[in-house]
Image: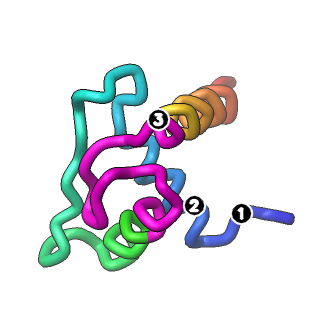
């Protein structure tokens, strides 16, 4: 099994959140954001990882997943 393009868009969106703080959210503007990010936000909301269809805040599960995403990105980015 490999990451699909949708998975990568979701991971990229999760990486934008500050996972160490549940007090910082993001807003994905439907009129100006790339369509794939708008769709990724909607999927993350459906999965219970973010509070709003267009971003919002990480849920408790979302915080865990965002932390894992950031660790994975850090490992893959190291030389």
User: Which residue shows up at 30% across the image and 66% down it?
Assistant: 53
User: Which residue shows up at 61% across the image and 27% down it?
Assistant: 71
Of all residues, the one furthest to the right in this rendering is 1
Q: Which mark is residue 60?
A: 3
**Label 3: how many Cα within 10 Å (few below 14, some 14–19, many 20+):** some
Looking at the image, is 32 positioned above or below residue 69? below
Instruction: Say which residue label 1 marks.
Output: 3
**Residue range highlighted in magenta:** 43-62
Q: Earlier in the sequence, mark 3 or mark 1?
A: 1
Q: Please provide percent x and percent y for residue 35.
A: 32, 78
User: Which residue shows up at 57% across the image and 39% down it?
Assistant: 65
Instruction: Say which residue label 2 marks.
Output: 8
Distance, label 3 to label 1, CA atoms, is 23 Å
The mark lying in front, picked from 2 and 3, is 3
* Mark 2 and mark 3 residues within 8 Å of each other at the beta carbon: no
Quadrant in which the N terminus is drawn: bottom right
Magenta stretch contains residue 40: no
Q: Earlier in the sequence, mark 1 or mark 2?
A: 1
Q: Which is nearer the eye, 62 or 76?
A: 62
User: Which residue shows up at 53% across the image and 52% down it?
Assistant: 11
């Amino acid at each position: 099994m490999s990451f699909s393009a949708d998975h990568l868009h979701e991971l990229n969106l999760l990486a934008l959140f500050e996972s160490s703080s549940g007090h910082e959210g993001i807003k994905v503007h439907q009129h100006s954001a790339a369509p794939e990010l708008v769709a990724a936000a909607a999927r993350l909301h459906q999965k219970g990882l973010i509070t709003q269809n267009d971003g919002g805040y990480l849920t408790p599960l979302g915080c865990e997943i965002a932390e894992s995403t950031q660790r994975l990105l850090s490992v893959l980015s190291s030389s």
